[in-house]
Image (cartoon, rainbow, N blue to C red):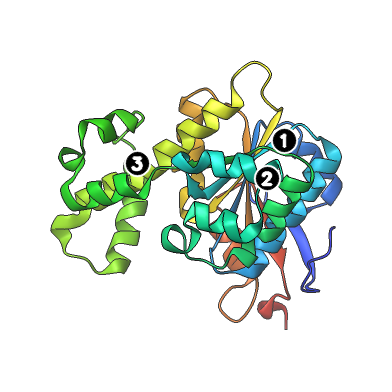
Amino acid sequence: MFPSRFGLKSRLYDLRTKQQVSLEAFMADLETARVIYVGENHDNPHDHAVQAGLLRHLWRQDRSLWVGVEMVSRPFQAALDAWVQGDTEEEEFLETLEWEERWGFDFGFYRPVFEFARAHRLPLVALNAPAEITRAISRGGLEGLSPEQKAALPELDTKNELHRAMVEEAFQEHKMPPDRFERFYLAQLAWDETMADTVAARSLPAGAPRRGFVIAGLSHLRDRLGIPSRAQRRGVASDRIVIPALLGPEQTLEDVLAAGGGDYAWVMGEDPASD
């Protein structure tokens, strides 16, 4: 097991069997996947430590990798290319990405992944839809988009009722007026479909790296309802979802296993239920 940089006890559970598994068995299974998705709560440093550690392990196992990031939208791909090639320093890089305005979470959380990609010349891939498009949808629905913005959107599948129910639950937590839900849902869908479209575009062409490593918020990955199932619809048939989970007063191991949501849980910390 690779150690957490925070010194926390960590272990792996197969969420399909609810059983603990070895690092060796876990890594062998990841070798069968075309894309490995690793979730995050954006402001949780433990989740980001798992992402960086797992990327290092995957690279040691197979160096034919690309790294996809939710945090950057597709129009900024050239900035990621320049970063990987070593043509820009961090301050200029973040200014070019408009990181603070468009993402806002501390780049320090993500620095280990970005620096590892740069050090080993792994393609960094901007996955997300431009904020200008999702904001326009939130304000006026699809009808509020310009012709150019509509042309930039991939196919949107609105028929997945489980996905709709998951987004509606999140919508209710935001306590917004009910009449805004449809626009909220379409904006979320534009995110997921655009990221799935990018995953497929990077995974399927002849000569593409053997594996993609995608970091994204848990809501875009859980139960394959967001990005993974939509990438599968586009032909990316094999994937694995890894969910980092920090145990503590508000989350026991039983909670993590019951919640499921992916293929594996990377569990950190002591289980309060075992005290």
Amino acid at pointer 1? Leu
Res 125 → quadrant: top right
**31 in relation to 215, above or below:** above
User: Which quadrant of the figure contains the N terminus?
Assistant: bottom right
* Point 34% across, 38% down: residue: 160
Instruction: State the image coordinates of residue 78 (x, y, percent, origin top left).
Output: 55, 39
Q: Assess disc 3: are there few (<14), some (14-19) or many (≥20) residues with their C-alpha within 10 Å of its C-alpha.
A: many
Which of the two marks, 1 or 2, is nearer to us in this view? 2
Asked if one can make out residue 162 in the rendered structure from this viewpoint, the answer is no
Q: Where is mark 2, residue-wise?
A: 87
Relative horizontal placement of residue 239, taking residue 136 as reference (left or right):
right
Q: What element carries label 3?
A: helix
Q: Which of marks 3 and 1 is nearer the N terminus?
A: 1
Which of the two marks, 2 or 3, is nearer to us in this view? 2
Res 101 → quadrant: bottom left
Q: Estimate the spatial distance between the alpha carbons at disc 3 and disc 1, rounded to whole Å.
A: 26 Å
Q: Earlier in the sequence, mark 2 or mark 3?
A: 2
Q: Decide which of 55, 228 is in the foreground and name it.
A: 55
Q: Estimate the spatial distance between the alpha carbons at disc 2 and disc 3, rounded to whole Å.
A: 32 Å
Q: What element carries label 2?
A: loop
The image's mark for residue 65 is 1
Amino acid at pointer 2? Asp
Q: Where is mark 3, residue-wise?
A: 190
Instruction: State the image coordinates of residue 49 (x, y, percent, origin top left).
Output: 71, 62
